[in-house]
Image: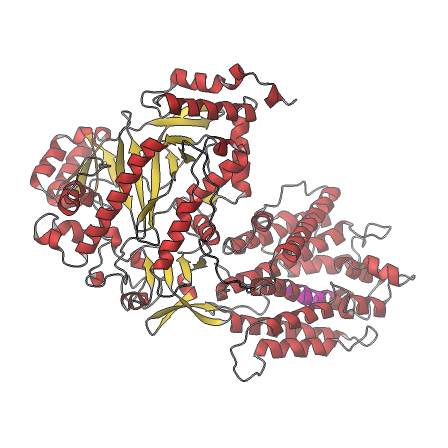
Amino acid sequence: MTMADSLSPVEAGHWAETYLARAPKGDLFAGAGKEMAGHWRTMLERLSVQAQGDPAALAGNVERQAIDLGLAFRLTGDQQERPWPLSPVPLLIGAQEWTHIERGLAQRAQLLERVISDVYSTQSLVRTGKLPASVITGSPHYWRVMTGSPPPHGHFVHFYAADLARGPDGEWRVLADRVRTPVGVGYALENRLALSRATGDLLGALNVRRLAPFLSDLRRGLAADCERSDPRIGLLSPGRFNQSYAEQAHLARYLGLLLVEGEDLIVSDGQLFVRTVQGLKRVDGLWRWMDSRFLDPLAFDGESRIGVPDLFDACVKGGLMLANWPGVGVIESRAMAAFLPGLAQEVLGADLILPNIATWWCGQRAERAHVADAMGELVVGSAFDRDVAGLTGTRFLPGSAMDAAQRAELLDAMARRPMDYVGQEVVRLSTTPAIVDGKLTPLPFTLRVFVARDELGQWRIMPGAFARLAAHGDIRAALMGEGDLSADMCVLDGKPVPQDGLLATTAPAIRRVGGMLPAKAADNLYWLGRYIERTEMTARVIRAIVGGSIEADLGPAVGSPTMARLMGQLALWGAIPGAMGAVGPLCAQALGDGAQTGSVRSLLAALAGIGEGLRDRLAVDYWRLVRLPLPDFDGGVTETLLDASSRMIERISALSGLAAENMGRTEGWRFHDMGRRMERAINGCRLAMLFGADWASADDLTVLLDLNDSQISYRNRYLSGPALAPVRDLVALEPQNPRSIVYQLMRLAEHVAALPTLRADGMPEEPQRLAAMLAARLSPLTGDGLTMDDLADAESRLLGLSDAIGQRYFLQRRKEKSEGVSLLS
């Protein structure tokens, strides 16, 4: 019996009783009705049993699951991704309360759609005085060019998010409407996955509604507005340095969308195409995750470098479904929120089921006077979410936090440009249980709830949400702030929930071809393979230096010509600053000095950077190995250096095994394997010339066999010690040796021959021609006839082949060096 099994019901229920004793008024658990309070107790009891009474252990388990799933995010200004902060205690909401929220959000989505449609067509709301023109034109997200250019199927909004707050009295209010880039749905899904892994069957036992049917409705809704019955839909990302890129990659993989960036796309004859290794392929729809201003530098912001020229042309000609339609962000401003209650009556003939937080736009005289008089009880903010006078360093500030001088400055600024300001009520939030510093603690929370059109155009609400637990009370931030936590929000049903997934309602036609491979993805896969191989060979050289041979001695002697050549090779690769100096410290630099561009640590960082651009294509296990950092070690201890380099080689071997056994034999796998074969062949030529020349010593030949992992093969074949011709033959020309140069050339020729061609005359393209010639050049030779000129010629041809592959299949956005350095971003 485990400790968890031995906990008594009293001990297991201790968490709930302790929390309730100090929960504030209006807490989600403390204020729950009898039935929901029972569900809260059941959940906390089971979590307590699982964690053996230790909240910190539960938090650690959930943190490990989040790391394993690759969850990460960035705050503005971050260069590196941060671990995803997930609370292990979900929020629970009952079905009856959730039905009220669903009705309110469906009504609100309908209202926003109708108002946006009016703004970009008849503008009757402005003409009749229901909506001031300056509320529209003052928004930086209003684009006059979109007026009179409706979406092909009339749907301005496909996907929408609302930030909700629950007051201590239990009333739900809408804090903000988000239609431009409503991030968070991927994080909500990932939170659910991590929590499910960490808590076993807990969510199933509570009858938690599943998220998959909503995402299936979203995908079918996007497809329904495309022209073709089996459309190709892309998720348009700003790039891997975007704050929510990890979320975008996860969503693209989960929904089966093509993750693309602006440089992947081109418009021709009013239609959108993606650049792939097979040439241009039509794209029928885009789910955009960038602001309208960046979409098309010819129609919107001419300084955009991440958009697609003429994308606006493809939209207005009806050849492209774009979700959401450019310009919809006009509805998001705080100034617009002041008019939505009245617009609901005007447009829908009903009051809002979910009201806004009370908002007064200062562009109206009476409202401005009210804000000025009641400033100490309100939050004053920018009406259009941009920097304004009097609110230095922020876009909203509680009046109670201002001193007399600040208040006077703000009132003076408001008198000059009143339309730039709004006043909003101070929102008091309900709290929910969370684990902070190993204790169950109440934290204020907001929810971001997601709404999508299904294939019939009806609004569907995700039965869950992204919950943000605020560490500092700044509830108006876009998604996450410093120190905030996220949490899963679960809707409880009264009966067991069917196990729906993304199961198709009608079976699609069977296919045995891989998905399309964009040119940039091929580029990244190729260089991922090259950097993996480069990392392994650097680790092998370090291991050879510190004594990683199967020979009886510890390897080449310090100061010997062989050792000098090994150290010189590390210096040539940029792993150490120079070949002179103590061997131990230099090898420690080659392994762990991030300042050396060719060190193992730096190569791992480059690998992780390339891998970030492939998150939608790499399996979780593969991605975890790619981004796993190099552990710290004591570089002064030779055995530790040997162990560290050996562990790195083992890690690369694990990557090789995953690629060999788990990657489908698609074009993506071919480019990845070509990268490894190319790097291994180039290094094979260089090392054979360095350690297999005519004057090579026994130490040289032993090192050459070690670096090519061919010692056992040589010993099984030859009883004598290493001899020049047999060693050359084995490491350079043996077609059955997976480490030989010829073996790499044969695999390269096979891969290149299997790649798609753009020629209609049946003639080979340049990469195919060069690869075939290269393989034919060395294959007939034997070790006793191989010369250094042959190897130098092979290396030169390999570099030429690599350039030809890049010119034919990759985006030509930058000039690649022949040495194989790729500046990936």
Residue 682 on the magenta segment: yes
Q: Is residue 476 visible?
A: no
Q: In the picture shown, does residue 435 fall above or below 197?
A: above
Residue 18 falls left or right of residue 413:
right
Would residue 8 be found to the left or right of residue 374 on screen? right
* Residue 442 location (% of width, % of height): 39, 24
Q: Quick check: 384 above or below 510?
A: above
Q: Is residue 494 visible?
A: yes
Q: Main secondary structure of the magenta part?
A: helix
Q: Position of residue 225 (x, y in %)?
A: 33, 60
User: Which residue is at a point 78% across and 50% down the rendered structure image?
Assistant: 547
Task: Specify the quadrant that holds the N terminus.
Answer: top right
Comparing 79 with 590, the one in front is 79
Q: Residue at x 9, y 42 (%)?
A: 364
Q: Please tell me how many numbered marks the rendered image carries.
A: 0
In this view, the residue in front, 367 or 494, is 494
Who's the residue at 66% across and 55% down the image? 661
Residue 742: in magenta span: no
Color style of the picture: secondary structure
Q: Residue furthest bottom?
A: 761
| x and y percentages locating residue 294 in the rendered image | 32, 59
Q: Which span of residues is magenta-colored?
A: 679-687
Q: Nearer the viewer, residue 418 or 677?
A: 677
Q: Nearer the viewer, residue 642 or 762?
A: 762
Where is residue 385? Give x, y as percent.
Answer: 25, 46
